[in-house]
Image (cartoon, rainbow, N blue to C red):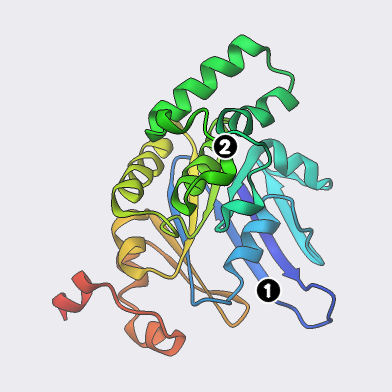
Amino acid sequence: MLRLENVYFSYESKNYILEDISLEFKKGLKIAILGRNGCGKTTLMLLCSGILKPKKGKIFIDDLEVKNPRLLKKHVGIVFQNPDTQLLAAKVYQDISFGLFNLGFGKDIVKKKVEEIIKRLGIEHLKNKPTQFLSYGQKRLVSIADILVMEPEYIFLDEPEAYLDYKSFLKVQEIISELPKEGKSVIISTHDSDFAFEWADYIYVIDNKTVALHGTPDYVFSQLEDLQKIGLKIPLIKRLEV
């Protein structure tokens, strides 16, 4: 389990972007971090992945306090909303294999793992293409492959629907729904209430710098007054019930 306890974070200013954040991500669950644009969802993911360090508070992996952010990077993978920040190599195969070679895997094992993940994502046709000539949606799929091939226990996706056409998004949705069955924890950030309601096992709502609501989708979206104050849309299926 990945757990945050009373975490605070600010950038250069003294004003906190996130305050007193306490939450937990259990393995085998689909979890949505829901909130309006600019509420701190991406910052929270960067803290969980070890890219940012809390100003106050603690982060735990399996009840072991994380003193060095590098420990998080061994367990956590993050797919950024903008794929251009993630693609490093000239060609798709090189990009997906980059992290595995850095970990010391041999050529044959790397080839097997990369072939498996590009088949799973349906991007075999992109294997030898230069990354600079890919569409934004194709880049997004490659950036997702970059992380999934590393097999992290906790997989964070920032706005997974961004830049994907409908067919590609359905493929990604299928995969992120399968991974928890393999013991992974998949955590997405989104402002799409309908998708969060349909997909997630558990939801955290971020507002006013902290966790404003959390629980099952049915519970969270039954708190109509709170959601109205936060400014989140009620899922269509819940609106039809009213």
Pick the residue in front: 39 or 18. 39
| Mark 1 crowdedness (10 Å alpha carbons): few <14, some 14-19, many ≥20 | many
Q: How many marks?
A: 2
Vertical position of residue 225 compared to residue 27: above or below: below
> Which badge, 2 or 1, comes first in the chain's sequence?
1
Instruction: Estimate the x, y position of residue 136 in percent, counting from the top left.
Output: 49, 53
Instruction: Estimate the x, y position of residue 193 in percent, counting from the top left.
Output: 35, 69
Res 153 visible: no
**Secondary element type, mark 1:** strand
Q: Is residue 31 left or right of residue 101?
A: left
Res 191 visible: yes
Pick the residue in front: 95 or 91. 91
Q: Is residue 190 left or right of residue 46?
A: left
Question: What label does residue 131 carry, if any?
Answer: none
Q: Residue at position x 43%, y 89% from top?
A: 229
- Residue at the spot of label 2: 130
Q: Residue at position x 79%, y 58% from top?
A: 53
User: Which image quarter holds the N terminus?
Assistant: top right
Q: Residue at position x 70%, y 36% from top?
A: 74
